[in-house]
């Protein structure tokens, strides 16, 4: 029997409630450990340039959703993907 309902302080395991974006940079070779955390996203690793690009992309993506009156949980994967593509800085 599932005892989850007896413990209402436990987080809900519904993916829509637990929506969170994760950026992972794999090109960091300068020895720095870069971590940026926000309410709806986390970014780890990467070179300074890559980490900054990922941070800018996800901040703008969350802002665009907010302007549309949506939260990350309410947006479809396609919508979030389109916004990420739109907000990714060009080199």
Image (spheres, rainbow, N blue to C red):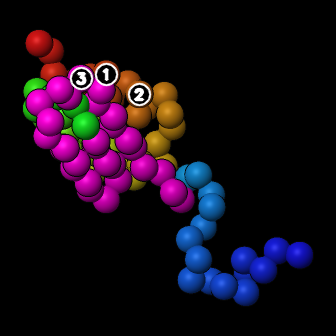
Name the foreground residue: 23 vs 88.
23
Question: Would residue 72 be found to the left or right of residue 16 on screen?
Answer: left
Residue sitting at 21 percent across and 49 percent down?
36
In the image as oriented, which residue stretches furthest toward the front?
31
In what element is the residue under mark 3?
loop
Quarter of the image for the N terminus: give it: bottom right
Of tags 1 and 3, the one toward the viewer is 3
- Please rate how many residues cluster around mark 3, counting C-alpha atoms within 10 Å: few if below 14, some from 14 to 19, many from 20: few
**CA gap, disc 1 and disc 3:** 20 Å
- Quarter of the rendering containing residue 45: top left
Residue sitting at 53 percent across and 59 percent down?
17
In what element is the residue under mark 2?
helix
In the image as oriented, which residue stretches furthest toward the right?
1
Name the foreground residue: 29 vs 60.
29
Determine which of the numbered discs, if any, sits on residue 85 in the image: 1
* Residue 76 placement (x, y as % from top left): 51, 37
Residue sitting at 22 percent across and 48 percent down?
35
Mark 2 in CB contact with mark 1 (< 8 angstroms): yes
Question: Would residue 42 be found to the left or right of residue 34 on screen?
Answer: right
Question: Would residue 41 be found to the left or right of residue 74 on screen?
Answer: left
Name the foreground residue: 18 vs 49.
49
Residue sitting at 66 percent across and 85 percent down?
7
What residue sits right under mark 3 in the picture? 27
Residue 8 lies in the magenta stretch: no
What residue sits right under mark 2 in the picture? 81
- Please rate how many residues cluster around mark 2, counting C-alpha atoms within 10 Å: few if below 14, some from 14 to 19, many from 20: few
């Amino acid at each position: 029997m599932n005892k989850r309902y007896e413990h209402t302080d436990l987080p809900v395991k519904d993916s829509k409630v637990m929506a969170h974006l994760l950026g992972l940079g794999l090109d960091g070779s300068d020895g720095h450990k870069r971590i940026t955390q926000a309410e709806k996203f986390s970014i780890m690793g990467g070179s300074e340039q890559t980490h900054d690009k990922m941070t800018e992309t996800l901040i703008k993506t969350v802002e665009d959703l907010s302007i549309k009156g949506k939260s990350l949980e309410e947006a479809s994967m396609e919508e979030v993907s389109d916004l990420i593509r739109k907000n990714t800085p060009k080199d």
